[in-house]
Each structure stands twice: as structure tokens, then as C-alpha cells.
């Protein structure tokens, strides 16, 4: 049972001189399955008992030992030439056509391609894949599929550089981010995005109003449809896969936020509210929405309809402003679909546990089951520095209720911009929430991973436990803190209980006993116990008697 | 609005030479309310706007600047002489008597003393207070009260010292642990417990079978009722407030675990299972249960009926072994109550989200609503090193469903013994879960804390935000990482968005607008909007027209 393999690479730094993190995750290697001419990636976790577990892999070529990485050249254009005709995935799906992108995600999720097509055609799933981002590996967002995780990155006027942001993208994808959003608002906004897109194996989302606002020196009132439109086109051309558009912030909803504890907490929402007030009219996002649809359709960019009026505190959860906007997002969803543009809907925010399910129910009802994409939600306001946890709780619950993608929250939420460690903590926390959601929804393959890890735990295959962990390096490091010696990696105990107190060791005796007495099925156990019971009762034994003390 | 007070003490180390951490939490000070001759403690968070928030305080005299701490002498005997007659809280409650302990917890929770008495009398709440632990500050565990958190500490044969364990107790209580359990299994087990008890302001729990097993050199088969009984009496005399007793592990249940992925994972459960198999009879815990009740009654020690067959993996959740044992725990609950001994019931373990509520429902049904005390549960097995999070999700959900006390899980779970940092992370994570539960259950005062913090956030009172955080030091440290300068503590923006993109700043404009137009109530807003609508429609304005693009 001993793990005799040499440890695999744990290259967690820029050892290769590429400027980004490369090399496989400890104990894993990249494999590709050939499916209908497509090379579908997976992460293979090799186990010491000769078995292996293949898990969904978001990390792209960076974890492939055979790949050559050059961030100045960018990734290979995987999807180049996959489709001769420019139609959206939604248009193809409605026409009954299974695209190569759909085949790819079906193979990736181990589900029928027809299910993929059908869910997209109904609008219940989206496949965000701008034709100008051929470097991306197709993925799907919808409640019938694995719950996905988005990681926000991006610099601000105050901090961070282009290089750091590219590395954050690679780093986030390494640990399991299914998409990333570039929320940069500072200098070099175009260049940062370009470098991210050319190197991103996962779909990239943005909030175009941020860049538009930079163009008018930060004065919301000076924003115009033309400036916004040109910004959107610029970003579509670069290859942005989905865009947050706060078109649901209507003038009449704005005063509904006046009584709130925390008012409007969405940056985009507050910008649009300010514009509406300054001009006393509906925003250009709303009045030009159909034109916007036509632009997005040309590139197959997916709408992420933003919840500009999401609650920013427990006190403001599920209020009239929030749900009024949601109704408008439903109206916009139907318009976008008529234009064959894919749509997902953004959700809160800060919501106490007992109000979470209502968000999903209403979103599905009002927005015709468009995939829900939520930020957390945070289930309490009292723990800044731990908001990955306050929100991880809400994220798991809202995933269980049907949310298709979770936007991560890092420990720095409300306090500062996340660094590399925060990004990892945020992604791992949200992978936990997503996976807990998959288990709770009964995803057919989700529990394999839990079972593999628990089996390794029960059999004292310590190294396999580490390799099967979402974060192998930290799991091993924690174990090494109290029992660093190499023999401890095969020991049949750990530092928690010591050798004498190991419940799992004692359990082995129980197994041996059951085996010896033929009690290897529930039926056999019951039958055997019935016999024993009669035998003991007859013989005056103490077994099964009531308490005799 | 600037915070001009000098920063309060942040004494997080042993600066006073007491060997334990003393001094108030940053931004707080200890206050006492005089209620009927009792001094009821609270932690007062002072705010820069002249307001303050008093929160429940578990930390004891260690955070009181006016207290003298001497760990060799122990804490003052707060409860000495409170009761002349030796009866249990349950006996008094059944007799209609409100004890001083009940008055104390009623004041502490800001709830009627009669409710406290009634819940105890029904067995739906417990007040664990061994008459030999007069140093403790009374607290209550029950679904109608604030959700409580337990922190496990204790050394093992492999690691840790007495001094470290005493400091871990003080440290855990500092951050909010409502009780601690000393799970020591190594050397100096009696001395460690003595030092913890004499210095603990919170109730202390143990698992006596661990010490009993040490007495027979770790061979479960050699355990006897007499050895166990003497161990229990020794611990009762020391002042242990509640004891985990795995009396529900019946012989016939043991084979039910043979088909499990992880067998028996409870240390106590595996010890008792091994004993049952070795002797082929029911355990002495079960057969001598009434005698055990008489001992516990003499000291008013509370039973924590252990779930020796709890699931140790997702695969084993809610199985027959688990629920068969739960039924027996219900039987034992009724016997204990007849002896006027208080009872709580321990619960899992590893449970996927969709199976959590069923645990609470069954526990309440089978155990006559005895307070449920659960370990997590972990909602997935795949994240060792993050099991405070996998379990924090389950803990919050099971608290919402009615669990009265949550046993914390630290990041070291499954990997090693927790150190000081792990204890803090575990406690803070579980305070989040408990508070999220309080909010979801609609505890009348829970949301005050969230509202105070969110109000501070909206008003850019940064220092107040830190002080209102469950962990002020870490919140401030994270903020300082990107904006360390002191002026940033009063800045109307943060590093996330920078000065131009602050949604909260823009929201202020919205407020001013609403104020100016008299839109300060929902009714006024609706009326105003109706007028505006008519006005604009009449004038051909664009407001409220359908999308016109």
C-alpha cells in the first residue's frame, strides 16, 4: 500500500521563466481524450494503488508538461476554423445543430451532446465563446451541468500591474476557475485585457461600462450610448466572451434604494443610476438594448445581465429594488434571445440563509430559467477578512438551489484587492461550494471524487489523500507540520489521535469480525443478529436485554 | 465622522507575563450589567459616532483590563455559594424554580428567565454547570437561544504541552468559543484538565473513555465498568461540565458499519465497538447507564450522548448504522431525564447538503428535542486543509435547521492537531456559521450587529468596520496591505475601486436627490413616480416607454 512513486512536479512558481505559473498540480498530470477529432483535457490524479481519478480541468496548457508557454505569443488557437459560418451557439442549438463546441463540453462533462444542445436552445445554459477568443476551451454554464466558478481579477487606479493580472488569471484557472472576469479600472486597461485574452484558456468576462467611464474621466453624466457602443465593439473584437450589462437599472427603481442601509453597492449599478438621475431618463443601456444585442450577436458574446441594485447588506436583501430590477432583466432576457444572443443573470450579494432559495425561484420564474450567476451571497455582514467563508456558505446553498455559476469572493472583499494567495483561497473555497452543490443536486459523477479521497483516508494512503485534495500542497504542508517524517506518510495513524486511538485501525477489526461471521451484507447482518438474539435470549445472556443496571 | 479615539489595546500575546493572552479585543472593552445582584458580562464595541454595540462575550476575565490574572491560582469562583442545595438545573426547572444560573443566562441572552426555565424543564435546552466548576459563567444551549460554538483542544501522545492547552482554551474563548472540550489523550491528562478547569470561564466537556483507555494501556478489551466509573467520578470532582458518552453503540449496530467506506470514525465509538466485539455483549456504558446517571446527577454534569457511529464520509451519511444509534440515544435521553440529568445529543460528521435537514428532524423526533450538538457537518470530503470551510457550510445549514451548538472544525482536521492560529480560524469560522444561523432563525437581536457594521461601511467609518468585525485585527491588517496610510482610514473610497468608482459615494448622490424631491418613504416614492410617469408620458418624454431602439 506504500506510495513508492517519486513525487510529481509541484512547480508553483515562475521557475520556467514564462512569467506565469506552469507545471502540473502535485500528483496529477494532464491527459487528453480524443473525442471525434477533439482533444478534451482532464486532470488525472494517479493513485498509489494503481487506480486513477480523472477530474474536470480548467487550467489549460499551463499544467501540461509537454506544452510550450510563451505569454508574448499567447496560447494556440484551439477553436480556429471550427465554424465557417458566424452564428451564435444559441442559433445553432435552436436550429438543431450540435456544434464542435457543444461536443467538446459534452465530452468534458461526460454528458450527452444532445442534452447540451437542448439546454442551450431552451436558454437554460450558455456556452460563452466569442469567435475572437479562439484560445479558449469551450465550457458550459447551466443548472444541469457542473456548477461553475468565476474569479474576478483586474487592477484599479490604486494598485497592480499587467503582468500580475495575467499571472492571476493563470493562477485562478490552475486552481479551478471556470471563467475569469477582468474588472480593471486603472491605466492600460486595453493592454491588460489583450494580454489576458491571448493567454486565457477560460472564457473572459468584463463590465464594459468601467472602460467607458475611464474615457469620460470618471463622470457618469458624460457617458453616451456612442462611447459605450464603441467600447463594447472594441472589447468584442478583442475576444471578450461575456459582458456584464446593467440595463435593468431603471429610473423609477433608483429611489427604491434611498431607504436602504447600504444603497447601491454595484459599481455599474451606481454609475447607471447616476446617469439616469443626471439626465432624468432611462439609461442608454435600456433604450439601445436591441442594438446592443445585434453587436453581441455578431461575435457570439453572452450577456451577463447585471444586478445593479443587488443588496449590499443583510438588511437590504430581497427588497423591492432588487426584485423590481430582476423583473426588468427578465424582459431583457426575452429580447436578447429573440436576437439569438445567449443570456445569464447576475444575482446577489448579501442574503441571509432563509432568503436564498427565493432568489433562485424568482430568477427562474421571471427570467425564463436563464442561468443564474451569483456573487456569494454573503450570509452575514459581520466578518470582513472572512467573506470567502460568509459567502461560501451562501454560494453552496444557492448552488444547491440551482445557480449555475458562482462568482468567488476572496478574504480581501470589502478591504482591498486580492493578491495571489487571496485568489487561490477564493477559488478553492468556491470549488468547495460548487462541488457541495453538485453533490446535493445528485450530479451523477460528483461523488466519485469524495469516495476516492475517503477510501484513501480509510486505507491510510496519505499521499493519495494529499493528491486527491483540492489543494494538495497545503494538505501535505499541514500534515508535515506535526508529523514531518517520511514514514508518517504510510503510518496507520496520525498526530490527532496517535497510534493507540485510531478509530480507523479499530474499524479494521470490526471488518475482520464481520467477514469471519459472514456478515457482509445488510440481509446477512439482520439474519445473523436475529439468530444471535434468539440464542442469547434463550441462554440468559445480556445481549439485547433492556438496561439492567 | 473621523475616528479620533486612540486605538485600544490589541494585546494578542503574553505581554502581561501571565502565560495566556490577556487584554481587550481591539476596539472593545469589557462591561458588566448588574442584574439582580449578578454581574453579567458583555463586550462593548465603541463606535466613532458616539454609539456602541454590546455583544455576547465568552472571553471571561482575560479581556477585562481591571482583572488580575494568575493561572496558578485560577479564576475567581463566580458561582460559589449560589445554591445551598445540590439539585440539578433540570430538577430546579421542573420544580418551577428559576436559579441564579438561569437568571444569569437570561440576562446574557436578553430573554425572559421564564423562557430559560421552561426550555430547560422541557429538556429542549441545557445549562451545563458542574457544581465543582464555580469559575464558569453560566450559558445555555438550546434552539431558542443563540447558536453556540464548541472548540476542541487537547494534546495527544504525539504532541503539545499543558501550558499550550491552557492558552488554547483562553484563546478559543477570546474569539468566541462558548464551551471547550479537552480531548487530551497523552501524558499528564489529569493535570492538563485541572489547569484548564481552574482557568476556564466557559463550560468544559470531556470524553472520559479516553482517560479510561489510558489506564488500561490502550487495549479496549481490558476496559471495565469499574475503571470507567472511577474515571467519571474523578472528572466530575474536577468540575467537568459535560461528558461525551458513547452509550448508543450497541453490539447489533456494529456490523452495520462493515459495508461503509470509512467504517467507524469516532474514537469513542470505535473503542466501544471493539469492546462489544471482544466480549460479545452490550457495553458497560449501556448496561450501567442508570448508575452513570446517578453519578452525573450528583454534580449536575450534562450528558453529551455521543454519536459513535457517525458517518466519516459523504458515502456513509444518513445510513442505517447512524440512525439506529440515534434511536438508542433517544431511549437513553428519556432515562437520563428521569434521573434529572440534562442531555444533549451529538451529531455528524460528513453529510451532503441535501441530507442535513433530515438529521435534525430525526434527532428531534427520536430524542424528544434534546439540544443537538453537531460536528460540522462537512459537506464534501475533497478539501482537506479547508475542512473548516467544507464543514462551516454544513454547520450554518444545520444551525438554521435547529442545531443548538456547533463543534468547530479547524483547517488541520484530518491532517494534524490544531495550533493557535488554527484554533482562531476554526472559532471565527464557526461564529460565522452560528451567527448566520441566528439570522436565518430570526433571533430578535442578531441583525443589529450586521446593521451596525453595514452602516459603518456605508458611511466610510473604516475603523468602526474593523472594530465591528468578528476579527478586528485581521480586517485591519488586510486593509492596510493595499492602503496603509492613516488618511485611508477616513477616505471615502478603498483600493478595490479607487476614488472615481465608488458605488457608495455615488449612492450618496441618489440619497440627496431623493431627499430633495421628498422621496423619503416607499409611499412617497410610488406617488412621486406615478406623477412623474404621467408628466413624462404626457410630454412625450422617454421615461417608461418600452425599448425604443
Image (spheres, coloured by chain):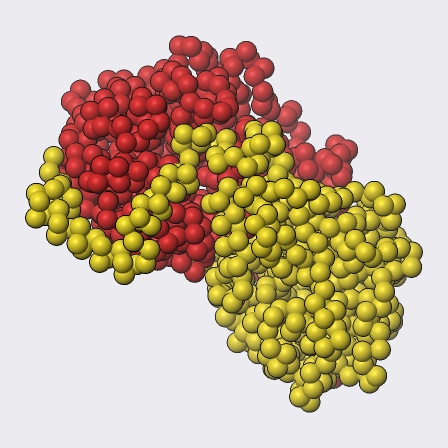
Chain colours: A red, B yellow
Instruction: Locate residue A401 relative to residue A343 in the image: left or right.
Output: right
Vertical comparison of B287 with A354: above or below: below
Instruction: Locate residue A263 relative to residue A52 in the image: left or right.
Output: left
Kindly identify the residue that appears in the image at 62 percent across and 69 percent down: B109
Kindly identify the residue that appears in the image at 60 percent across and 77 percent down: B112
Asked if residue A386 shows in the view, the reply is: no
Kindly identify the residue that appears in the image at 22 percent across and 28 percent down: A224
x, y percent for residue A286: 20, 38
Tell me where residue B347 sits by quadrant: bottom right
Dividing the image into 4 quarters, which one contains the C terminus of chain A? bottom right
Tell me where residue A192 sits by quadrant: top left
Tell me where residue B487 sits by quadrant: top right
Instruction: Locate residue B379 relative to residue A107 in the image: left or right.
Output: right
x, y percent for residue A438: 42, 47
Vertical comparison of A362 with A78: above or below: below
Kindly identify the residue that appears in the image at 20 percent across and 34 percent down: A284
x, y percent for residue A279: 22, 37
Dividing the image into 4 quarters, which one contains the N terminus of chain A? top right
Amino acid at each position: 500500500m506504500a506510495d513508492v512513486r517519486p513525487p510529481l512536479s509541484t512547480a508553483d512558481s515562475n521557475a520556467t521563466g514564462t512569467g506565469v505559473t506552469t507545471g502540473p498540480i502535485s500528483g496529477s498530470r494532464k491527459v487528453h481524450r480524443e473525442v471525434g477529432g477533439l482533444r478534451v483535457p482532464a486532470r488525472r490524479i494517479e493513485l498509489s494503488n494503481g487506480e486513477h481519478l480523472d477530474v474536470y480541468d480548467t487550467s489549460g496548457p499551463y499544467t501540461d508538461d509537454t506544452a510550450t508557454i510563451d505569454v508574448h505569443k499567447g496560447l494556440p488557437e484551439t477553436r480556429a476554423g471550427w465554424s465557417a459560418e458566424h452564428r451564435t451557439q444559441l442559433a445553432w442549438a435552436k436550429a438543431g445543430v450540435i456544434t464542435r463546441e457543444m461536443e467538446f463540453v459534452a465530452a468534458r462533462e461526460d454528458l450527452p451532446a444532445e442534452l447540451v444542445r437542448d439546454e442551450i436552445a431552451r436558454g437554460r445554459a450558455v456556452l460563452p465563446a466569442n469567435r475572437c477568443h479562439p484560445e479558449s476551451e469551450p465550457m458550459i454554464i447551466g443548472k444541469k451541468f457542473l456548477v461553475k466558478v468565476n474569479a474576478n481579477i483586474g487592477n484599479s487606479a490604486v494598485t497592480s500591474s499587467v503582468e500580475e493580472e495575467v499571472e492571476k488569471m493563470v493562477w485562478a484557472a490552475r486552481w479551478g476557475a471556470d471563467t475569469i472576469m477582468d474588472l480593471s479600472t486603472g491605466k492600460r486597461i486595453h493592454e491588460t485585457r489583450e494580454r489576458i485574452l491571448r493567454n486565457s484558456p477560460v472564457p473572459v468576462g468584463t463590465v464594459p461600462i468601467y472602460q467607458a467611464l475611464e474615457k469620460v474621466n470618471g463622470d457618469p453624466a458624460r457617458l453616451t450610448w456612442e462611447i459605450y457602443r464603441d467600447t463594447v465593439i472594441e472589447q468584442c473584437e478583442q475576444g471578450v466572451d461575456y459582458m456584464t450589462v446593467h440595463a435593468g437599472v431603471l429610473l423609477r427603481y433608483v429611489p427604491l434604494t434611498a431607504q436602504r442601509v447600504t444603497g447601491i453597492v454595484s459599481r455599474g449599478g451606481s454609475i447607471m443610476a447616476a446617469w439616469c438621475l443626471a439626465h432624468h431618463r432611462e439609461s442608454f443601456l435600456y433604450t439601445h438594448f436591441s442594438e446592443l444585442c445585434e453587436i453581441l450577436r455578431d461575435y457570439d458574446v453572452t450577456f451577463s445581465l447585471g444586478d445593479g441594485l443587488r443588496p449590499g447588506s443583510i438588511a437590504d436583501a430581497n427588497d423591492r429594488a432588487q426584485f423590481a430590477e430582476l423583473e426588468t432583466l427578465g424582459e431583457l432576457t426575452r429580447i436578447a434571445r429573440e436576437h439569438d444572443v445567449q443570456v445569464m443573470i447576475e444575482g446577489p450579494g448579501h442574503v441571509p440563509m432563509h432568503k436564498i432559495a427565493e432568489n433562485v425561484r424568482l430568477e427562474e420564474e421571471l427570467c425564463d430559467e436563464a442561468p443564474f450567476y451569483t456573487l456569494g451571497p454573503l450570509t452575514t455582514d459581520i466578518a470582513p477578512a472572512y467573506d470567502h467563508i460568509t459567502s461560501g456558505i451562501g454560494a453552496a446553498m444557492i448552488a444547491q438551489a440551482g445557480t449555475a455559476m458562482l462568482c468567488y469572493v476572496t478574504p480581501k472583499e470589502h478591504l482591498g484587492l486580492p493578491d495571489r494567495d487571496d485568489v487561490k483561497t477564493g477559488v478553492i473555497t468556491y470549488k468547495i461550494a460548487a462541488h457541495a452543490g453538485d453533490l446535493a443536486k445528485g450530479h451523477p459523477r460528483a461523488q466519485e471524487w469524495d469516495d476516492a479521497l475517503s477510501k484513501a483516508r480509510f486505507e491510510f494512503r496519505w499521499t493519495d489523500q494529499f493528491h486527491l485534495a483540492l489543494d494538495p500542497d497545503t494538505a501535505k504542508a499541514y500534515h508535515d507540520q506535526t508529523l514531518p517524517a517520511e514514514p508518517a506518510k504510510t503510518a496507520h495513524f496520525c498526530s490527532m489521535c496517535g497510534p493507540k486511538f485510531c478509530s480507523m485501525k479499530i474499524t479494521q477489526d470490526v471488518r475482520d469480525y464481520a467477514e469471519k461471521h459472514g456478515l457482509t451484507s445488510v440481509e446477512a447482518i439482520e439474519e445473523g443478529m436475529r439468530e444471535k438474539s434468539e440464542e442469547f435470549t434463550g441462554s440468559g445472556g445480556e445481549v439485547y436485554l433492556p438496561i439492567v443496571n
